[in-house]
Amino acid sequence: MPKLPLAYRSQVPLAPFTSLKVGGVAEYVAQPRSISELLEAWHWAKARGLPITLIGAGSNLLIHDQGLQGLVICTKHLRGVEFAAGRVKAACGEPLAKLAWQCAERGWSGLQWGVGIPGTVGGVVYMNAGAQGGCCADILQTVEVLTPQGEVVTMPASALDFGYRHSALQTAAWQGYFVLEAEFQLQTGFDPTVIQKQTAQNFQQRHATQPYHLPSCGSVFRNPYPHRAGQLIDQAGLKGFTIGRAQVSPVHANFIVNLGGATASDVYAVLRHVQEVVYQQQGIWLHPEVKMLGYN
């Protein structure tokens, strides 16, 4: 294998790249600071037949203790935002919470729900993330992606087949498509103090009801309509359930927290136990919202 360029590293622990603080070692890691650097990394891996994994802030990830083969590209340094007439164009590594505050300061409405989401724009599009009655699909207009052939193309939001915490990007047919940039349409002309107040209230509500004091991956399971996953887990008596150093949060049952020193195996074992107990007691199989990497 030829010597890696300066921007690349080999045998890199991935736990620090995730909000759960668990996960094994990556064969290679690149942290580009521009699209040209990302494309360089992509071509470098493709030329060597290596699998490529893109991650952002790592806030919705569970990475296997055995780590990941190939090249992991972390996009959290790909920043940049343009504001024009209610349109917001943001790079994939831009933090959504920061973007929500910037829109509120302008009196632009439509992204107040995003203030408590710790992910980046790329991850938000991939997951169709949402909270408090809003989601990405409500405001997304276009998305710029890197195709498996190495082309950069722009497509309408309608092409992504959005559903509840779902986009076409999660399907096998779209494997290898990576979000580079997204453009959102917001409503303008509001009093900034009103939008800022709404945004602040959303922020306070999330922090009052969720365990932000410990590492987690956010909501672990999708809500099985018309139920809420957290309520089902709570009703099953699983708040505080612990395996190793991973625990169902006593604050919010749809969170699995790292008490310090947890492994991905601990987290996965808790996740599976919750699924099985809820199914046994209530006949509902909870489907993970967290993206699991390195698991078959």
Image (cartoon, rainbow, N blue to C red):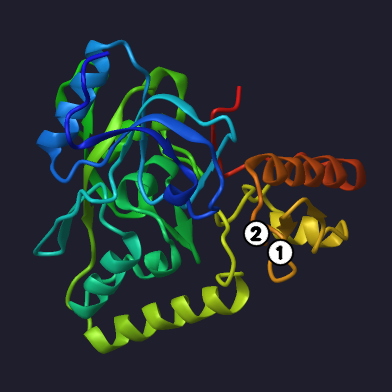
The number of numbered discs placed on residues in the rendered structure image is 2
The 10 Å Cα crowd at callout 1, few under 14, some 14 to 19, many 20 or more, is: many
Comparing 238 with 285, the one in front is 238
Q: Residue at x 66, y 51 (%)?
A: 262
Q: Earlier in the sequence, mark 2 or mark 1?
A: 1
Comparing 271 with 195, the one in front is 271
Q: Which residue is outermost to the bottom?
A: 193
Query: Element at badge 2?
Result: strand
Residue 257's disc number = 2
274 left or right, relative to 218 = right
Q: Residue at x 83, y 58 (%)?
A: 238
Residue 28, placed above or below residue 192 = above
Mark 1 is on which residue type? Ser
Instruction: Tell me, yes or no, if residue 149 can be seen here.
Output: yes
Q: Dots 2 and 1: beta carbons under 8 Å?
A: yes
> Quadrant of the rendered structure where residue 294 is?
top right
Residue 16 spot, x, y in % from top left: 45, 51
Q: Residue at x 64, y 54 (%)?
A: 261
Residue 13 spot, x, y in % from top left: 45, 41
Q: Which residue is mark 1?
A: 249
Mark 2 is on which residue type? Val
Q: Which residue is outermost to the right?
A: 281
Residue 241, placed above or below residue 102 = above
Quadrant in which the N terminus appears: top left
Comparing 48 with 201, the one in front is 48
Query: Element at badge 1?
Result: loop
